[in-house]
Amino acid sequence: MNKMDVLDSLHYLARLSRRFYSREGYSGRSGNYSEGHGDRHGRGHGRNYGGGRGGRGGHRHASHSEMKLLNILKAEDAINARDLAERLDIRPSSLSEALDRLEKRGVIERSRDEKDSRVYWIKLTESGRNEMENHFEEHNKARLEIEECLTEEEKKTFLLICEKLSTHLISLTSNSTLGEM
């Protein structure tokens, strides 16, 4: 490996991580990870684990942002769409698109409020709970496999550096510095 700066190292680590998840034999994801860049419909972009556009068949696993949404639903019996969008810090239209995808897969269900028809309540289905359990099992297995080469001290140091870089990148984006490049 050539001498790399921090940004190059982050990109390289991200690519290796995607390869790790796409390798044959990795539970539930064997080779269905669509890597690269493209549009928001899964055509050569993002994390399309099999189903839908851009995948190669099989069941589509939830993306990272969908898992954040599902985590909130797991903690709540039901939540209305406005509160969910606020907690995720996303536009209601973006939430609606994500909910459409998840509902189509049978992971969540929406129902209108009996008193106010403008309000939708969202809750996790049994299938959604099962998908989350499978995801957490796979995630934990992968995490242990990846971390096995690090000591506890190295893990702590790595996480502190990641947190510091994340905080700095957030401050740069909030100051519009990155947007002007």
Image: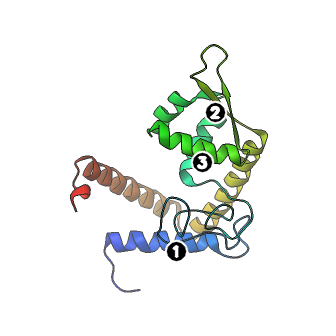
* Amino acid at the residue labelled 3: Met
Image location of residue 154, percent across then percent down? 47, 64
Most extreme residue toward the top is: 115
Image location of residue 59, percent across then percent down? 73, 60
Judging depth in this view, the residue of 55 and 1 nearest the camera is 55
Q: How far apart in space, not on screen, are marks 1 and 3 (Cα)?
A: 21 Å
Q: How far apart in space, not on screen, are marks 3 and 2 (Cα)?
A: 12 Å
The secondary structure type at the circle numbered 1 is helix
- In the picture of the structure, the residue carrying the numbered disc 2 is 75
Question: The C terminus is located in which quarter?
Answer: bottom left
Task: Say whether disc 1 or disc 3 marks the residue closer to the N-terminus.
Answer: 1
Judging depth in this view, the residue of 50 and 116 nearest the camera is 116
- In the picture of the structure, the residue carrying the numbered disc 1 is 16
Task: Say whether disc 1 or disc 2 marks the residue closer to the N-terminus.
Answer: 1
Most extreme residue toward the bottom is: 2
Name the residue rendered at 71%, 44% in the picture: 107
Binning the other alpha carbons within 10 Å of mark 2 as few (below 14), some (14 to 19) or many (20 upward) gives: few
* Amino acid at the residue labelled 2: Ala
Image location of residue 68, percent across then percent down? 56, 45
Judging depth in this view, the residue of 111 and 122 nearest the camera is 111
Image location of residue 125, percent across then percent down? 74, 38
* Amino acid at the residue labelled 1: Leu
The secondary structure type at the circle numbered 2 is helix
Binning the other alpha carbons within 10 Å of mark 1 as few (below 14), some (14 to 19) or many (20 upward) gives: few
Question: The N terminus is located in which quarter?
Answer: bottom left
- In the picture of the structure, the residue carrying the numbered disc 3 is 67
